[in-house]
Image: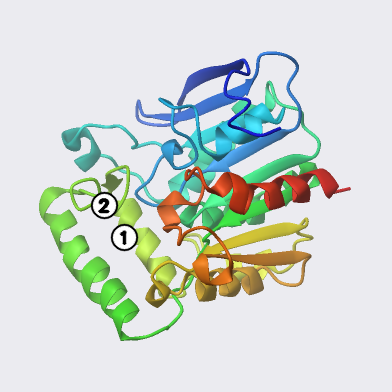
Amino acid sequence: MSYKSALSASIVKERLNIPVANQQFAHLLRIHPEQASGQAVFMLHGLMDDASCFHDADTQTGLAYVLAREGYDVYLAELRGRHLDTKSLSNLAFGVEEALVEDLPKLVATMNKTAQLEKQIWIGQGFGSLLLAKYLARNPEKLTNIQTLVHFSPFRESQPTGAVKSFWVNWVHRRGVNLLGKLLGYIPAIKLKLGRSNESLNFYQEALCCLNGTWQSKDNFDYLSEVKKLDWPPSLYFASLHRSWRGSETDARAFMFDLGDHNARLIKLGRRVGNQKNYKRSELCLHETAEQDYYPLLLNWLKELP
């Protein structure tokens, strides 16, 4: 079904506030057909981002709506800290481990109260893919319900691809943005035009540690070792070629190899591989031309899975 011709299709949207800890809430946005819904799709945003990386509520466009109009039951997860005022955010004690052991278990459990349990589709964007991999390493039994994983510009350890990227990671993020965050008590991602959501300072700092290659928890859980033991379902990886110095393709491939031997396919996106435009990483699940460029590939992948 073409998503432009299906804009009039009846879609239901529900938003749930999920208590997590310290009177804070994670959020789950469900988008699904008014009639019977199909397979469940669980989608998780990345660093300095929120569920709007997958959908535009005003125009009802984006990958989440495309999937809903195809009959899927779509669940957009938001970790705590999204939409907080700056004072509340600066006082938020929240890091990567809290996301893994508190927020994600409750988000998944809430989804499973209404979703089909079998043949689920899990989609991560950026750092969200790493969080999903870590969560599944701690909860490998969840893999039995997952038919496929889809990753949009995933990364774990930042791969060296040149001086510009080194400057961006080591000086802009590790020093400049981190220092500003310490002064303010939070990361002002919206004003700095680094993302759609301001971020908890502690969460941001712990995410940066992952770029150093560290993939071990505070309780010494060795994620790098554990993920290689898992029987991963068929997985699709998309990497933007926009601003090649960012090395999104290199980072995505390294992330894919970190998960060990599994049925994986890496798709590069950009004009030089025949797409209509060079997609920014932030546009991968939103831009309208994606309907012709690579959403059909994704939809065919999902339909052909056993």
Q: Nearer the viewer, residue 151 or 224?
A: 151
User: Which residue is painted at 72% across and 45% down in the image?
Assistant: 299
Name the spot of residue 155 as percent of width and height, x first: 50, 65
> How many C-alpha atoms fall within 10 Å of the one at disc 2: few (<14), some, or many (≥20)?
many
> 31 or 288: nearer the eye?
288
Counting the numbered discs, the total is 2
In the image, what residue occupies the spot 62% across and 38% down?
42
In the image, taking residue 131 as reference, residue 47 lies left or right, namely: left
Find residue 201 and name its label.
2
Give amino acid for label 2.
Leu
**In this rendering, does residue 138 appear at all?**
no
Using the numbered discs, state the Cα–Cα distance from disc 2 to disc 1 in whole angstroms.
Answer: 6 Å
Let me know if residue 37 appears in the view. yes
Q: Is residue 38 left or right of residue 3?
A: right
User: Label 1's element?
Assistant: helix
Instruction: Identify the residue under disc 1.
Output: 205
In the image, residue 87 sits, relative to residue 215, either above or below, namely above
- The reply to whether callout 2 and callout 1 are in contact (CB within 8 Å) is yes
Task: Write the residue at 56% across / 50% down.
Answer: 124
Residue 40: x %, y % from top left = 70, 32
Tell me which residue sits at (49%, 61%) in the image: 217
Name the image quarter holding the N terminus.
top right
Circle 1 Cα neighbour tier, 10 Å, few/some/many (<14 / 14–19 / ≥20): some
Extreme-left residue of the structure: 183
Image coordinates for residue 100, horizontal then vertical, percent: 52, 47
Residue 141 x/y as whole percent? 75, 47
Type of the residue with mark 1: Gln
Tell me where residue 30 sits by quadrant.
top right
Considering the numbered disc 2 on the image, is that residue within a helix, a strand or a loop?
helix
